[in-house]
Amino acid sequence: MAGLPAAGENALLAGLTASATFAALHTADPGSNGTSEVTGGSPAYARKSITWGSPSNGSVSTGASLVFDVPGSTTISYLGYWTASTSGTVLGSRALDTSQTFATQGTYTLASGNVSESIS
């Protein structure tokens, strides 16, 4: 057997989604230390609890929308997966499809199902 069958891929993703329970926005690649996380604003930026669907065929997607408050003068370009609402451990990240610049305070929404991870 070469590689993992879908059941193995699903098991790995289930482990990730059980631990990656918060999402964060970053202004640059957060790397392995979770740097460049957005801060500030009114209402203040905060990580959001992330809900995942069940892994299937080596892929998993979010099960609910994420709405972040973003301060003005901020350009967001990455989404990070975290183990806690503050501090915690960054478990991974992905570049957003397109960076977005906020001249003034605003919100950034990731619709349900628009964030997905797969093993291939």
Image (cartoon, grey):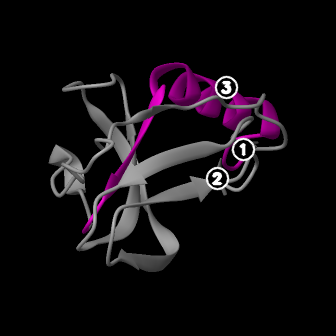
Residue 109 location, quadrant:
bottom right
Q: Amino acid at mark 1?
A: Ser
Taking the spot 74% from the left edge, 46% from the top edge, the residue there is: 112
Looking at the image, the residue that sits furthest to the right is: 57
Earlier residue among tags 1 and 2: 1
Q: Position of residue 118 (x, y in %)?
A: 66, 51
Give the foreground label among 1 and 3. 1
Which residue is under mark 1?
61
Mark 1 lies on a secondary structure that is strand
Mark 3 lies on a secondary structure that is helix
Mark 2 lies on a secondary structure that is loop
Q: Is residue 85 left or right of residue 54?
A: left
Which residue is under mark 2?
115
Along the line of sight, the residue nearer the viewer: 98 or 43: 43
Q: Position of residue 16 (x, y in %)?
A: 52, 30
Q: Which mark is residue 44?
A: none
Earlier residue among tags 1 and 3: 3
Taking the spot 48% from the left edge, 57% from the top edge, the residue there is: 107
Taking the spot 24% from the left edge, 57% from the top edge, the residue there is: 30
Earlier residue among tags 3 and 2: 3
Name the quarter where the N terminus is drawn: top right
Cα–Cα span, label 1 and label 2? 6 Å
Q: Which residues are magenta?
A: 1-28
Q: Amino acid at mark 2?
A: Val
Q: Residues within 10 Å of mark 2 (few under 14, many from 20)?
A: some
The reply to whether dot 1 and dot 2 touch (C-beta < 8 Å) is yes
Q: Which mark is residue 11?
A: 3
Residue 78 location, quadrant:
bottom left
Q: Residues within 10 Å of mark 1 (few under 14, many from 20)?
A: some
Residue 76 location, quadrant:
bottom left
Along the line of sight, the residue nearer the viewer: 6 or 106: 106
In this rendering, the answer to whether 53 lies above or below 106 is above
